[in-house]
Image (tube, rainbow, N blue to C red):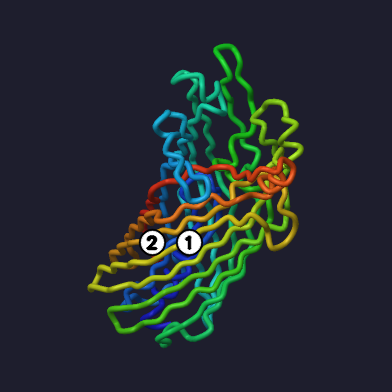
Amino acid sequence: MKKIVALAASFIFFASLKVHAQGCVAVRSTGGVCMLGASHDTVKTNWELYANNRYFRSYRHFVGTKEQKQRVEAGTEVINHSYSLDLTLLRQLHNGWSLGFNLPVNANIRSSMYEHGGNGGGADARHKTHSFGVGDIRLTVYKWLLDPATAKANVQVGLGIKLPTGDYKYQDYFIKNDSTRLLGPVDQSIQLGDGGTGFTTELNAYYNISHKIGLYGNVYYLFNPREQNGVSTSRGGATSATSLLYRSDVMSVPDQYMLRAGVNVNFNKLTISAGVRNECVPARDVIGGSNGFRRPGYIISAEPGLQYHIRRGMLYAFVPVAIVRDRTQSVPDKIRTAVTGTYAKGDAAFADYLVNVGVAIQF
């Protein structure tokens, strides 16, 4: 590896960041922000450590692509505050091979009324649930098809495993009234993991138009063969007859995917990037069944970013801004539609933007 080792290493990291979708559509371990404008003057390194801080606040409710503005106006919206520290260690090997290890630490706060005293209970009915701890870790092996030290354009393939290390049964108290609290699993959107052992596939590509301008693209898919994780959706209460009928009484273990493309422009130590990102939880999985509760949907975002290169490292910030938010029809929604004869589709709360800020260190 010569002058482009930083390009290859940072490309792997930013293409493999774990990302929560911007709201109740729970996307975990998906591809994140990608940086193709790394300095071509960085010396050869064997190890790289990345610390990424991510935050979003979701509160805008959508059914399909239609925003339910009345939720905010009535004060009944669900508000998620989600923070995650992603620690990623990369080991550069020979002939374009490398290994990546990702450890997320998550902290979430969910404020709602319907989970507690009910939407009609006034301001006193709004309460919070929390979750904190390690999420699902991921191990990935990567291979550049061409020599990244000399290639003007290149494609990288990745294959990984996601382990169910995050607590997917995390519990907190739901306040029903002044004298009643129920201990139960928190909402799927703030669970620390999904309970499934999955495997990931990736394709990452770049094309350097010149020493200042480059194009990038990423495709990521998480396959989760497990259909359900057995965690109740009743929040400590009794399971309802309708949730049993529509098969939404336990949480699903969904697939996830991410598509990205954009351009980087280099100005000495500063790199400016602009791209588009699509994150999605599909209604049906590629492998295994798709019953159980999930909020399928997708978010298309514009993704500006900045990277500032320092000695043996970099500082960066990326802020994907939502353009399209779509809560699609789930399998339980489709079952309900078939049973009742009336088209049914649930809602989900989304954020306006997502903040990624972090540092990379080469050693």
Q: Earlier in the sequence, mark 1 or mark 2?
A: 1
Above or below, comparing residue 118 to residue 194 in the picture: above
Mark 1 or 2: in front is 1
Classed neighbour count for the residue bearing mark 1: other residues with Cα under 10 Å, few (<14), some (14–19), many (≥20): many
Query: Which residue, given by chain and number where applicable, does mark 1 sit on?
Result: 278
Q: Is residue 267 left or right of residue 26?
A: left
Above or below, comparing residue 112 to residue 313 in the picture: above
Quarter that holds the N terminus: bottom left
User: In front here: 340 or 324?
Assistant: 340
Quadrant in the rendering for residue 356 = bottom left
Above or below, comparing residue 242 to residue 24 in the picture: above
Residue 307 in the image: state x and y as whole percent. Answer: 31, 64
Q: Amino acid at mark 1?
A: Asn
Query: Which residue, given by chain and number where applicable, does mark 2 sit on?
Result: 360
Quadrant in the rendering for residue 116 = top right
Residue 122 in the image: state x and y as whole percent. Answer: 46, 19
Q: Element type at marker 1?
A: strand
Is there any visible trace of residue 298 in the rendered image? Answer: yes
